[in-house]
Each structure stands twice: as C-alpha cells, then as structure tokens.
Amino acid sequence: MSQNFPMENPSWDLESIFEGGVESEQFAAEVQWLDERSAELTEEIERLRIASGRRATEEELGRWDRFLNSYFDTWDRLGEALSFARALASAHADDAKAARLPSELDDAMTVMRGVGVDLKARFRGIADEAFEAFLKDERFSRRILWLKELRRDADRAMERDLEALAVELNRDGFHAWGRLYSQMTGRLKVEVEGEEEAMSVAQAKNLMSNADRDRRRAAFEGLQQAWGSVAPTCASILHSVRGTEQTLFKRRKGDYLTEPLFANRVERRSVEAMFDAAQEFRPLLERYLKAKAKLLGLEKLEWFDINAPVGRSEDAHISYTEAQEFIVDQVDRLSPKIADFCRMALSKRWVEAEDRPGKRQGGYCTSLPVSKEFRIFMTFGDNSSSMTTLAHELGHGYHAHVMREMERSETKVPMGLAESASTLLEAIVEQAALEQAEGAQRLSLLDDRLGRAVAFLIDIPARFELEKRMHEARQKSTLHEEMLSEMTAEIFAEHFGEGVSSVDELFWASKLHFYLTWVPFYNFPYTFGYLFSRAVYEQCRREEGEFVDRLDALLRDTGRMTSEEVARKHLDGDLGDRKFWVEAAGDLKADVERFEQAVAEAV
C-alpha cells in the first residue's frame, strides 16, 4: 500500500525525467546528444549494405545487429525527450517557451526519419534469400514482424531521394500545420455566460457534463463562438493537411486508408466488418437517447445534452481523490495486481489532472521508454466522465508497464490494440460498480456505460465517415468552413438519427484528432478497441483466476502480431467476421432495457 494514496496533488511530476522544467539544462544536453547521435547514425548506415544474390555473412549480420541496437536506443531516448517536451507544452499551452519546447527536437526527429528512409532504401527490392538470412538469425528473432513490415513499406515507398525530401519538407510544412493547430487552440479562450473569467477549451468542455442545463447550453454556445472565430484558419489547416496526405498516399501506391490500415496492423475487411456491426446497434442506442431525453424532461436531446449527468443529485461531485479510490477499489475486485499498479502510478504523481486555464484540451498517456514509466495528461472535472477518462488512461499506462522491458521493435502497438487495455479497464470499473450499485447510482452508471457505447458505435463511425468525406472533397475542390460544417451536420445527423435534435456543426474544427499529422484516421481504432476489449473482458471473466496472466500475454503480443493474429491466438476469433463484433457488444440490449426500466420507474 502506498502512503501517498490517494494523491491529493493533481499535478504531475516531470522533474524526475528532466529537472528544471522549460529551463532544464538536462533536457538541453539531451537535445544536443540526440542531434549528435542521429548525425552519427546517418554516417553509420551509409557504410551498411545488404548482400545481393547471396546470404549475408556472420560479420555482415553482426554489423546490422549492432546498428539496429543503437538505432532503437536512440529512438527510445528521443521518445523520452519528446514525451517530456510535449507534456510541458500540454500543461502550459499559454507559455510560449513551453509551446516551443517540442520543436527543439525537430532536427533530431528529422534526421532520425532520414535514417529510417535509408533503412528502407537498403531493404527495397531485397532478394528472398538475403532477407531469409535476417529472419533465421537468432539475433533478429524479436524483430521479425518489424523486418517484414520494413520490407513491405520499402517496396511501396517512393525513391530514396523523394522520401528524404518528404521528411525535410514535412518538418516545416505538413507537421508544422499540426503544431500550429495545437498552439492556436491551446491558447483559445472561451467566454461562457455566467462565468466570471474566460475558460480554456478543456474547462468549457467539462461544463458540457454539468447537471445544470443552462450551464451546458452556455458552455456549448461559448465553445461555438470560440471555434467559429478560428474556423477559417482551421479549414485552411485541414485543406493543407489532407492535401499533403493525399499527395504522399498516391506516391506510395495506396489510397487514404492504406497507411492507417498498415499502421494499425489490421485488414480492410476487418474494419468494414466492424463498422457493419456497429451500424446494427444504432436503433438500439437511439432508444437509449430517447429514454434519457424523457428522464431529463425533454422532447429530444440537443447536442449539449448528450453527456448530461442523470441518476444523481444536481450538486453531486466526484473529487479527484474519490475517483482514485473508486477506480482502485473496483479494479481490485478482479485484479489486485492491476489495482496495485494503479495505486503506484497515482501515488508517484504520474498523472496531471489539475483543472485550470492554460492547458490544452484532451487527454493522453505517453510512455517514457528510458525511465520505463509513463505520464497521463487530462483535466479532471469532478464528474464520472473524468473518472472514466482517468481509468481509461491508467489502462494505457498498464499496457506500457507490461511491455516496458520489451525491445522497441516489439513495442510499436497499433492503435486499435493499444485501446484494448484502456477500454478494458473502463469495463472493469463500470461492471464492478454496476454489480454493487442500486437506485439512482445504478441509473447513473448505466448512463455512463451506454454513453460510451454511443461514443464508440455512433460518434466514432461518424468521425470515420467525416474524415473519408474530407479526403473525397479535397480531391475535387478547396476545403472551406461552410463545406466542412455542412458535411459534418449531414453525417452526424445521419448517424445519430432520431436520438438528437441538433448536432455540433463545428465538430470538424474542434476535434484535435483530425489535425494529427502523425496518425491519419485517429478514429476507427477507438471502436476497434472498445469492441475488442469487450471480447477480451468476456474471455477473462470466463477464465477467472487466469485473468491477469491471460491479459498480460495478450498485451505483449499486441506489439509483435497483427490484429487478426492476436484475435485468433487469444480469442479464437475472426475479425473479418461481422459476427465477432456483434457478439462483443451483445449485452448492450440488456443494458438499454435496464435503463428504460429505470427511467420508467423514475419519471
């Protein structure tokens, strides 16, 4: 048991990574080391060649092994420094020095990507016999999937000089657009009627879960005004981001989904089967939204009512310390090992949860591959939604913890599988809570549970469709704010159907995920993780005592297998079969019926 649990301090500890914050001399020294080491790797790979028409010698394979060890080590140190820099930039978005900190790593990042280009160039067109020498050598046994993907990407890449040029141009072009969006929106102020001071986007978003409908409406209107003020700039950024992606996709012999599917190690047929299954649940979830409207005394929910709390008194709050205790208590019922992990992470202040201005929106968990730690960023809003977010991010942290001693080539987890542990931890918390809850508390927990189903089975598919439509429109014309707002309204109205009477037409501007230049289509993996983790949870429940060992083995395999392989090995499932996904959410019907019954008893 930790003496510091629950942790009252909601701010994180970054000093143990690099001392001194934005003025850290340790960080500056690390940046210099990374600049020098990445340049050295550029020279080293120039001296490496792959034998043509014959198997590599023992000496040649040894040189490749030593190079890759150094290559992965440098990426680990770069990842550690970048996590630190982005953490400070996220927590202090209104601090110009903090906002610029990640850019100090741009040179090293660009050079390392250039080394990656050279790596691909070495493996482009490699003969089968030469490649087999790598696969059969014991020193590369942990890198087999990584090597196969390297060869695949090498064969579909542009010529080496074009790929190198793309890396150089993307630093000050493509990725700069993403940084511009983050900096601009991190400083965005939201004027909310009834609030004495301007709020950050994250603070205003938290009010969208407030029990007072007038405050929810005021927050929504304030956010609409704020996003409307920057909508033209957001549209320009999206136009450039989507255009750059399309140029690169075509040059690399694919469409806008090729790279996202490769990055997620999932087949197109699996994603199509998943979204077909999700569509089946729309009428059921519309029933839930209509029942919630009835409970709130409304004819139909408006957009700002979707996350309205129900089943508890209007002045109910969940403090940060209460949320920590609740999560750990519920997780402990099924897994004392994971509960101890959560307790440890919270007591060591690996979480930034403070609710204050000057922070960027959203939440995330970032790994520290050198320290073998992680950090969680969020803004805790004293409500069940924030508690769920905390559980979700702790799940990501546990995933990183389980894989902390694995080689970097085995820790590249596709997003869909990366969401498995996080969404699974949510399921553990909500299921355990539901089993012991009664009355109003049970109604509240059912609402939270079904609200997440709406997010993953309606909202995320709508985002996926919206990003696809952005690409289709960008191929024909200029993306502008009126077009994007009309597109958003049409798609979200179609997906939410009769469940709501209005949608957020500026969702395209406010959703950070559309502007992430490192990971296109940052949406379908959430639905994947939600459904996949439900299947994992049911498997774990059936196995009872073997739960943790089974889960840990699955999590480790997420970095060294494709999604389909993980499903076959650990769940005996076929991701290309619509039935797998439908069965994963099979208990939703019972949840909706229980919610409708609880509403009928309450009104």
Image (spheres, helix red, strand yellow):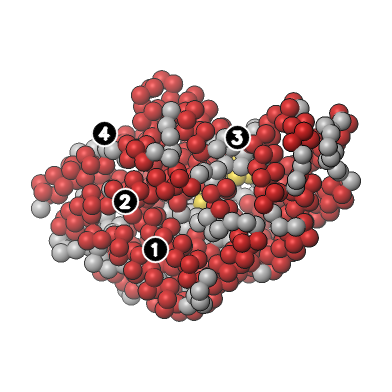
Residue tagged 4: 435
How many C-alpha atoms fall within 10 Å of the one at disc 1: few (<14), some, or many (≥20)?
many
| Label 2: element kind | helix
Q: Residue at the location (24% across, 37% down)?
A: 437
> What type is the residue that disc 1 sits on?
Lys
Question: In terms of depth relative to the viewer, which is nearer, 185 or 68?
Answer: 68
> What type is the residue that disc 4 sits on?
Glu
Residue tagged 2: 279
| Label 4: element kind | helix
Q: CA distance from mark 1 to mark 4?
A: 30 Å
Q: Residue at the location (51% across, 33% down)?
A: 566
Q: Nearer the viewer, mark 2 or mark 3?
A: 2
Q: Which mark is residue 42?
A: none
> What type is the residue that disc 3 sits on?
Arg
Q: Is residue 134 visible?
A: no
> What type is the residue that disc 2 sits on?
Gln
Q: CA distance from mark 1 to mark 3?
A: 37 Å
* Residue lying furthest front: 53
Q: CA distance from mark 2 to mark 3?
A: 31 Å
Residue tagged 3: 560
Q: Position of residue 459 (x, y in %)?
A: 36, 56
Which picture quadrant has residue 504? bottom left
Which picture quadrant has residue 105? bottom right
Mark closer to the chain start, 2 or 1: 1
Verify CB contact (< 8 Å) between mark 3 and mark 4.
no
Q: Is residue 227 above or below residue 441?
A: below
Residue tagged 1: 205
Mark closer to the chain start, 4 or 2: 2
| Label 3: element kind | loop
Mark closer to the chain start, 1 or 3: 1
Q: Nearer the viewer, mark 1 or mark 3?
A: 3
How many C-alpha atoms fall within 10 Å of the one at disc 2: few (<14), some, or many (≥20)?
some
